[in-house]
Image (tube, rainbow, N blue to C red):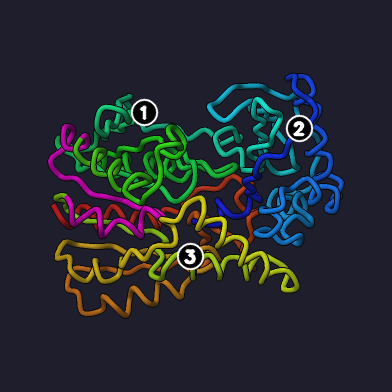
Amino acid sequence: MVVRNILFFLLLICPLTLTAQDVGKHELLAEHIFSLLLHNQTDSLYALLAENIKAQLPREQLEGGLTRVEQMAGPYQRHGEWKHETSAHGDVWSSTLEFEQGQFSFVVVIDANGCIQGLRIMPNMNKQAVKDIPLSPDAVEVDDTVRTGTEIALPCSVVISGRSTSPPIVVMVHGSGALDRNETVMANAPFLDLSRQLAEQGISSLRYDKRTAVYPETVSTMDDETILDALSAISLARTYSNNVFLLGHSLGAMLAPEIATRTNLQGIIMMAAPARDLSEVIDEQLSYLVPADSAESIKQTTIEQLRQQSPHYLQPQHQVETAQSLSLPMLIMQGGRDYQVTMRDFDLWRDALKEHPRVLFADYPALNHLFLPGEGKSSPQEYATPGTIPAEVTDAIAKFITSQQ
C-alpha cells in the first residue's frame, strides 16, 4: 500500500545553483549524484542540499539509500543509458537501475539555471517481466477509455466472460502509487491475474491505468487520486453490465466504502483494506522495514514529506464509519503475512462490522499484501518472484458476487 511510495527514497530537492548551463553538463551532474548514492557518500550528497532542505531532511535519511532498495530487489548490478526529456520544471534525466530481482528508475530534474528540482528512486513497476496470463477461450478482452471530465482519459481493458449470457462485472481499484491497469508490482500483476481467473467463473472485469501513472500533476486529493476515476469507471462498466461490483485493493479498498456512497453498486470487495488512518499504517510499515536505530528520524521525515507533497494521505478518511453506514453486501479479505496492511486492520474491520448482516470476512494466513503465498516473514523481495493468486481467493470473490444475483 503506502510503502510503495515510501520505500523508493523520495526526495524533493530545492534549487541548487550550479556553474554548468548546458545539457551535457547536466547529464554529468545526474551521473555524479547517482554515484554519490551508489557509493553511500552521504556527506557529499548532503552538502548538495539547500539549507532549508537540510532543516527538513535528517542526514540519516540519505544514509544507505540504495541499501534500502537492495533490501527490496537484491544487489545492485548496473544502470542503463541516460534519457533526456523536458518538462515545465526543467530537463529530466532518467536511467534504469538493474538489481538482481527487479528494475528501478532514477530520475533527476534540472532547471534552466542548472538547479536541481527533483531527485528520486522508484520501482520501475510497468516494465517488470510479468508472466503471461492467458485469457480463457470463451472470453474476450477489449480496449476502452475511462473518462473523468474533459481532461482525464485513462486507457482501460474490459474482459467480457463468455460463461454466462449476462455476466456481472467487477471494477478494480488500485492501491497507492503510479500503477498501471494490471496493478503491476515488480514481477506480479494481481489485477491481470484476477481478471483471468474471474472470467473463468463467469464474471467480467474492468481495469484501468491509474491517474497517478498517466496524469500525476493533476493529483492533490483522494478524489483526484482514486475516487472520481473509480466513479467514472463504474459508469463505463454499466455500459457492459447492469450488475456492477467494486473490488478495491489496499488504498482502493480503504476508499471503497466512500465510493459506494456516491453511486449504486451490487456490492464491494475490500482486499487488504486499512482500517486505521494512513499515518498510523505508514508508521507501522516503517517500523517493520527500517532498522531501529534510524527508524524514528526516517518516520518523521517521511511524514513531513507526505505533508508537503501529498497531504491528502494524512487526512482521515473515516472509512470504518462510512462502511458502517452502508447497507450493501461487503466482502473483506486479508492476507495473514501482509506487513503493509496487517491483521490488526482486519480485526478492526471485523469488530466494527460484526453486527452488519451483509458483511463477510475471509483471511488467508499464508498470503502477503498481493495475496500471493509464501513462508516465513514477509518482505518486499517477495514481489520480485512471479506468483499466482490462489484459487481459494478468487473462488471466495466469485461466490460472493454470484450470491448477490
Which residue is depicted at the point 36% across and 28% down? 155
As drawn, is 152 to the left or to the right of 250? left
Q: Which residue is mark 1?
A: 155
Q: Amino acid at mark 1?
A: Pro
Q: Nearer the viewer, residue 227 or 22?
A: 22
Pointer 2 local density, CA inside 10 Å: few below 14, some 14–19, many at least 20: many
The CA distance from mark 3 to mark 2 is 35 Å
The CA distance from mark 3 to mark 1 is 28 Å
The residue stretch that appears in magenta? 236-262
Question: Which image quadrant for residue 63?
Answer: bottom right
Q: Position of residue 77 (x, y in %)?
A: 81, 38
Q: Position of residue 213 (x, y in %)?
A: 47, 36
Q: Position of residue 45 (x, y in %)?
A: 80, 47
Q: Nearer the viewer, mark 3 or mark 2?
A: 2
Q: Say whether marks 3 and 1 touch (CB < 8 Å).
A: no
100 lies above or below 156: below
Q: Secondary structure at mark 1?
A: strand
Residue 30 got which mark?
2
